Amino acid sequence: MTDPSSSLEYLLSRLDASPDPQFVDSLETALVNSFADLESRRAYIETAVHPTDSEKSAIISLLKDRFPQVLGTSFSVNPRLIGGLVIKVGDERLDYSLASQLANMQKGFI
Amino acid sequence: MTKPSSELTREIITRISDFKLQNEHTVEGRVISNTDGIVKASGLSQVAYMATVQFPGQRLGVAINLEEREVGILVLGDHLGIKTGDTVIATDSLLSLPVGPGYLGRVVNPLGEPLDGKGKITGPTHPQPLEKIAPSVTKRQPVDTSLATGIKAIDALVPIGRGQRELIIGDRGIGKTTLALDTIVNQKDQGVICIYVAIGQKTARVAQIIDRLDHSGSLAHTIVVAANASDPASLQYLAPYTGVTLGEFFMAQGKDVLVIYDDLSKHAWSYRQISLLLKRPSGREAYPGDIFYLHSRLLERACRLSDDQGGGSLTALPIIETQSGDISAYIPTNVISITDGQIFLEPDLFYSGIRPAISVGLSVSRVGGNAQQPVTKQVAGRLRLDLAQYRELAAFAQFSSDLDAATKSQIEQGKRATEILKQPQGEPLPLADQIIPLWAVVHNHLADIPLEKISEFEIYLRSFARRQGKKLLTHISTGHKLTAELEQSLLTLVTDCKKEWLK
């Protein structure tokens, strides 16, 4: 049950009789909206190297200050960032990576 | 000239040391769908209406539909290659156009990018939003200055004032664009800046129009904004707003501007296409509910500013193409109700050789009368009534061959007035050249000229006046009313001319 459609299938399989199509539509919309809400409350953090546990805690505590709505975090490693980290919460993206700083510097030269 | 390597190294070091670290905070969305340049994207929760967004590959878009979880985006330009899942980045800026004097004499697209191969727009520019609220009542003053079109039938019967909105309406191929272009040509050396907005026209036709303007020497005071039939609906939708934004720049400097929108029917089609793709509810003729506001907010930006605001003016000549002369269709009635009058062109008149094919009965100028030159008002004041009576009598005379002399004379005068109002395309006339033949016909001095020779006589009369009546021409050119003495001189001029011509 990781996405709205599989959740909907699961819920429908638990029902004895086939439900009203309008009910199914409303249920689907509600599920999509709740998944979207959950998604916007999750912070995705990309780092250039594996962070230590203490670094992770520091990042999470800083995130709580800026995004109090955040309920969960996911860490991943992306060596292309070269250094630093990128945080994504909902549709906001905070780029503190060395790769983007170098790209900005390159733009300044052109 | 190449720089020595030491200097280059120094410059690189300086630039690196001057570089300031910036943490990038962006608001992003993801493309859900791309339908003919209308993109639906998720995210972008903080994007503003009419704000620009950026797609991969430096493509721009503008947010025009804001919903709870989705944003409808109009892609500006090429939308091919935008795919589902692409990142869309919101920007803080509203859709704007860098305006400046460098646009004069240029052909640009609705984004202000040159299309004429003459290089970048030069000179200072500053960005102005494309969508702007029209000047308020307190910033305006009444329309009371004439905008001479050089077309006798318009200047005499449906005069246009600076700051007015006068609709040109008629079927296809009966001279709407010609009227507009002649008006542009007539503004040469008059200090009026012209903006011609081509919406959804064939590229070859736009090229012809540019060529005509260039050959008549009118391109120097004109800007052409072109969104051709092959351009996406987004550009066709934006084109008139680009035209008016450029016009407002010059108006704010106290200048007089004439903007021609050719044509708003195709503009309405492009907006209908966009709205249907955005799944907005459709109404009459499948147009969206805000189609009236689409044109009213555009045409309301035409005005004459008060002297405190610089006294500039923006005159709008929108064009509407009708189908089989039906002016009661949705878009024509909308635009008729928005504008300050209309010039209605009739196919029957056009094909019977009356060109410009202006229907005197259905054409009207609601504010132009106050702006008409006093001399034109004096001479042509009763022409409209005379022509109306002539039409009525001519219709009645079809059923009766036995007419009294007075009626016959009135019909003959009406025929001659109709002949005098004919004018070849591309030959706008100065005020004095219009007034003399009009005066002659209104005062029934052309009764002894055969009907088929009227045009020939008119040309002769104009050249005769240039030879024999220079003083009179100079006075008429001022636009002041004719005194009894001047009218006597006019009578002598016309009589002498007739004598010479009839020899």
Image (cartoon, helix red, strand yellow):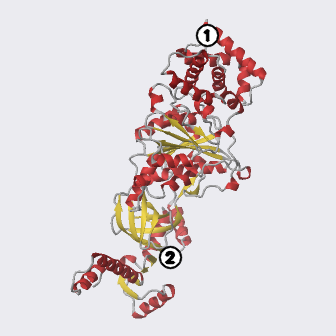
In the image, residue B441 above or below residue B120 = above
Q: Quick check: A41 left or right of B471?
A: left
Identify whether B204 is placed above or below B134: above
Percent of width and height locating residue B186:
60, 33
Taking the spot 43% from the left edge, 63% from the top edge, the residue there is B73
Q: Is residue B161 visible?
A: no
| Residue pictured at 27% horizontal, 81% vertical | A8
Query: Which numbered tag is attached to residue B23?
Result: 2
For label 2, the SS is loop
The residue that disc 1 covers is B501
Picture coordinates of residue B400, whole percent (x, y): 50, 19
Q: Residues within 10 Å of mark 2 (few under 14, many from 20)?
A: some
Mark 1, chain letter? Answer: B
> Which of disc 2 and disc 1 is earlier in sequence?
2
> Which image quadrant for residue B421?
top right
The amino acid type of the residue labelled 2 equals Asn
